[in-house]
């Protein structure tokens, strides 16, 4: 039998989520724009970077969770699963946007999400160099920056022709996906690349209207689900189905009307 997380539980867990961002940032920031222990995880000849910051930050987050909530599970990009079927499970990507990190660009983020009974209920998108934490749940989302909190709200964009759309890098798209992206980008006002999950935060903040991605793992997007929910945004797969704890092909939108127009162009029958 499933239920819902109670407001008192969220009230307890939200400050803890902020603390996890502090812990992570304290590990990562000394390695940003300096020697970061870069390694390549792809043994097939490609490039799949990981740094000491990725590994050490996830280890620090896991240690903090174990010290405060030993009954909680954890799923992380670097160290795998620990009790993934627990009632509460933290989903971690310590540095989302490792390529931006190693290039010295402050658009990488730390993604920390929390599942309750298998569904995302609380999440944060943190950028410690900019001193930003975008945090949210279905009850609402806000940006914390330098001791100031302000609510997050998506903006209205009922027409795709007025939309700003983002994706991380078209190199990850297969031929079908690239055709869909090209069709969609042509229909919008402005396109941006290279922001990884920081673009998700910009949708919640009302600065970007659409984000299109493919090939995502759960830790690449799950933390953003509650942030978008609380800011009034929508997140779906390319067929329009709700995205919960799954990655794959996703569309994030601030305005449902814009999402619906985007889905028409992303539909398989409309691919070249």
Image: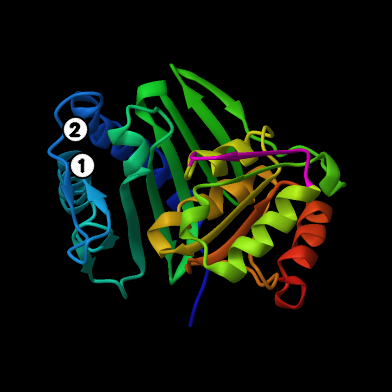
Q: Quadrant of residue 235?
A: bottom right
Out of 116 and 120, give the one closest to the viewer.
120
Residue 35 position (above or below residue 52): above
Which residue is nearer to you in this view: 215 or 204?
A: 215
Seen at 44% across and 17% down, the residue is: 147
Q: Secondary structure at mark 1?
A: helix
Whether residue 5 is visible, yes or no, is: no
Name above or below for residue 272 compared with residue 235: below
Q: Percent from the top left, x then y, of residue 117?
A: 43, 71
If you read the primary sequence from the N terminus, does the residue marked by circle 1 or circle 2 appear first?
Answer: 2
C-alpha gap between disc 1 and disc 2: 6 Å
- Can residue 190 be seen here? The reply is yes
CB contact under 8 Å: marks 1 and 2: yes
Query: Which numbered disc covers residue 57?
Result: 1
Percent x, y of residue 25: 27, 31
Residue 230 drawn at (x, y percent): 62, 46
Rendered residue at 40%/27% (across/down): 106
Q: How would you rate the neighbour count of disc 1 (Cα within 10 Å): few for under 14, some for 14-19, many for 20 or more?
A: many
Residue at (41% x, 53% y) in the render? 113
User: Total number of numbered labels?
Assistant: 2
Q: Give percent across and percent down for residue 164.
A: 71, 39
Does the segment drawn in magenta span residue 10?
A: no
With respect to residue 169, does 199 lie above or below?
above
10 Å neighbourhood of mark 2: few (<14), some, or many (≥20)? many
Single out the residue that lies furthest toward the bottom.
Answer: 1
Query: Residue 27, labelled with which disc?
Result: 2
- From which residue to which does the magenta span run? 188-195
Label 2 SS: helix
Left or right of 74? Residue 112 is: right
- Image point (77%, 72%), residue name: 270
């Amino acid at each position: 039998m499933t239920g819902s997380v109670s407001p008192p539980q969220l009230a307890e867990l939200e400050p803890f989520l902020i603390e996890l961002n502090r812990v992570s940032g304290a590990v990562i920031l000394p390695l940003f724009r300096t020697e970061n222990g870069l390694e390549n995880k792809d043994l097939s000849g490609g490039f799949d970077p990981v740094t000491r910051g990725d590994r050490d930050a996830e280890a620090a987050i896991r240690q903090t969770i174990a010290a405060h909530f030993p009954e909680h599970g954890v799923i992380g990009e670097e160290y795998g699963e620990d009790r993934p079927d627990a009632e509460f499970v933290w989903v971690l990507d310590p540095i989302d946007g490792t390529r931006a990190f190693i290039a010295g660009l402050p658009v990488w983020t730390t993604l920390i999400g929390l599942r309750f009974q298998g569904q995302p209920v609380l999440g944060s998108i943190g950028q410690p160099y900019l001193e930003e934490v975008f945090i949210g749940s279905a009850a609402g989302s806000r940006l914390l920056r330098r001791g100031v909190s302000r609510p997050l709200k998506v903006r209205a964009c009922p027409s795709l022709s007025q939309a700003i759309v983002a994706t991380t890098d078209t190199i990850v798209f297969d031929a079908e996906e690239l055709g869909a992206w090209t069709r969609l980008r042509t229909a919008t006002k402005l396109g941006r690349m290279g922001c990884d999950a920081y673009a998700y935060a910009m949708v919640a903040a009302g600065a970007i209207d659409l984000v299109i991605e493919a090939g995502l793992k759960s830790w690449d997007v799950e933390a953003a689900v509650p942030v978008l929910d609380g800011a009034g945004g929508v997140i779906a797969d390319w067929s329009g189905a709700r995205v919960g704890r799954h990655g794959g092909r996703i569309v994030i939108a601030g305005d449902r009307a814009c999402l619906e127009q985007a889905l028409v162009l992303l539909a398989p029958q409309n691919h070249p």
